[in-house]
Image (tube, grey):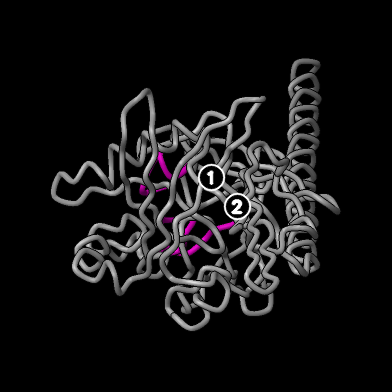
Amino acid sequence: MNTRIKIIVWGVLVLLFSSCEKDHLTRSVSDAEERQAALISDLKSGLQDATDGWVMMVKSSLSEVAYTPIVMKFDTVKNTVAIRTVYGLSNAAPTYFEIGKGTAQPLLTFSTGSLISALYRIGAEGSDLTDHIFKVMNVSKDTVTLQCYRSGGVYQPEGGATYQLFRRPKGWKWADEYRYFDLDDTNKWQQNFLNPTKEIALDIVDQNKTKTASTIWTNSAILSSLLTTFRRNDPFNRDVSTKALQPFHVFWIYFRKENNSYQTAVTVGHNALSFFPFSVNQNISTSTHVRYLADHLGTHYFVAKDVRLSGSQLDIDFVAYGKQGEEVLTTTYTSN
């Protein structure tokens, strides 16, 4: 009889503990779902609330100091995002994004064919992005923290680089819709820059060191014999998976590095000059020499921070940015 009572008591205790454990697991799952739902709500309102957009600073292997700004303006009603970058001009077709639940954190996914997708496919010279899907780690009034879902290829573990997006600074006028470097419209180009072909000198000041590069501004008509071939090899417009930007235009830059003279093709970004290599029939002017230029200047791009045109006087302030969006390299071109 006593043995039977003991067995019954133990059975009741087992059921009691089992019930408590199930209740604990149920509450844990419920709490996690509530946290995700709250984070998704904060993310949607935060993305929409930034009227000037958010900035993601990605790292290219082409430069030790400069980080590449990716400016994104989200529309959470249409699930579209307008992206502006130093690498080129965005296509007119909309880029889509999606916010959904993940295993532990919400996920922000950019569509295939977006600039984000293209950058991770292009590799380290474009950025340190390893996915177009991101875990949403944290959302605050002025920052959104994202982590690449994958750390590399298909069989690599989860968890890539982490990025803290910040609201686009008010002084970043170059990221507005208006284009200073509009080579699609020759009249606008001539109006803004006096002449479609002009030699300038860039004096880059970095930690009291001055570096120079003589530049030939030139439009597509002058390069018509080469431009079609160049565009076939544009890494940002080569195939469906990386067709994120419009076909580029090109400037020529002449510079000296270690007592050697080089010439190279430099592509036009959104109000920016992009020193990004691309291969054309073993043409070292578009690949090897571009890398030399980025190394020589200490940056793989320059954005036109400000353009001032008064009569025949033209001044352009160029900058490159660090990880927090701070100016790390500056130069000013003046026409007189």
Q: Amino acid at mark 1?
A: Leu
State which tag comes first along the sequence, 2 or 1. 1
Q: Is residue 182 magenta?
A: no
Residue 253 relative to residue 136: left or right? left
Q: Which mark is residue 202?
A: 1
Task: Residue at 67%, 74% (x, y): give it.
Answer: 311
Q: Is residue 120 magenta?
A: yes
118 shown above or below 126: below
In which quadrant of the rendered view does residue 232 lie? bottom left
- SS label for mark 2: strand
Crowding at dot 2, Cα within 10 Å, few <14 / some 14-19 / many 20+, comes out as: some
Residue drawn at (24%, 71%) of the image = 224
Inspect this view and state whether residue 128 appears.
no
115 lies left or right of 207: left
**Residue at far left of view:** 281
Q: Which mark is residue 333?
A: 2
x and y percent of residue 76 in the render? 68, 72
Give coordinates of residue 53: x percent, y percent: 71, 63
- Residue drawn at 66 percent across, 47 percent down: 105
Q: Amino acid at mark 2?
A: Tyr
Figure quadrant of residue 291: top left
Of residue 301 and residue 136, the one placed in the foreground of this image is: 301
Within 10 angstroms of label 1, few (less than 14), some, or many (20 or more) residues?
some
Q: Residue furthest right?
A: 141
At a point 38% along the width and 49% down the height, the residue shown is: 253
Q: From the viewer's perspective, tell me whether residue 40 is left or right of residue 121.
A: right
Viewer-proximal residue among 30 and 302: 302
Tell me the quarter of the image containing the C terminus.
Answer: bottom right
**SS type, badge 1:** strand
